[in-house]
Amino acid sequence: MAAAGRRWFGRSQPADPRHDLGRRGEDLAARYLEKLGYRIIARRERVLRGDLDLIALDDRTVVFVEVRTRSDVQHGHPVETIDRHKQRRIATLANAYIRRHRLEDCRVRIDVVTVVLDGPGGQPEIEHFQDAFESPS
């Protein structure tokens, strides 16, 4: 039986633990947002040469959600990993999505959800930053 993972030139490659961590964080973030009344309309949406983690509806606002996951905060809080370059990249991807789906007349914002898996009491700690940085224009 082949090992779990991606196939690359006929050989099986081990799964990337960061990918699994990110996917787990996205699942937790999506459930968290759904409990708040958001409706998830897309996950890992491929746009241009990038991915938008989650796209949701909050009432009548289209929300692009960047999810950042860490197993712990020993090397800093996950929100610290979103620098100006990453913010511009997310805004560019969001703008492309808006154009592709003809959503120019919709209200739009960009949120960030951080997930620390080893939170207090061993439970994941989830934080939600609404309108975290400049929304697409």
Image (cartoon, rainbow, N blue to C red):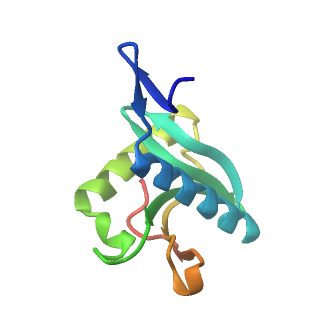
- Between 42 and 1, the residue placed more toward the observer is 1
Considering depth in this image, is 12 or 68 the residue closer to the camera?
12
- Residue 103: x and y in percent read 58, 43
Say how many tags the image has.
0
As rendered, which of 56 and 32 lies closer to the eye? Answer: 32
Left or right, 58 with respect to 128, comes to right
Horizontal placement of 121 versus 9: left or right? Answer: right
118 is higher (above) or lower (below) than 34: below
The spot of residue 87 in percent (x, y) is 32, 58
**Left or right side of 112 for 62:** right
Whether residue 49 can be seen here: yes
Quarter location, residue 6: top left
What percent of the width, then of the height, locates residue 106?
Answer: 60, 52
Q: From where the camera sits, is residue 37 visible? A: no
Residue 76 x/y as whole percent: 30, 76
Q: Name the residue rendered at 58%, 86% in the picture.
A: 121
User: Which residue occupies 57% across, 74% down?
Assistant: 124
> Which image quadrant: the N terminus?
top right
In this view, the residue in front, 94 or 66, is 66
Residue lying furthest bottom:
120
The residue positioned farthest toward the front in the image shown: 1
Q: Is residue 31 above or below residue 75?
A: above
Residue sitting at x 54%, y 60%: 25
In the image, what residue occupies the spot 39% across and 67% down? Answer: 133
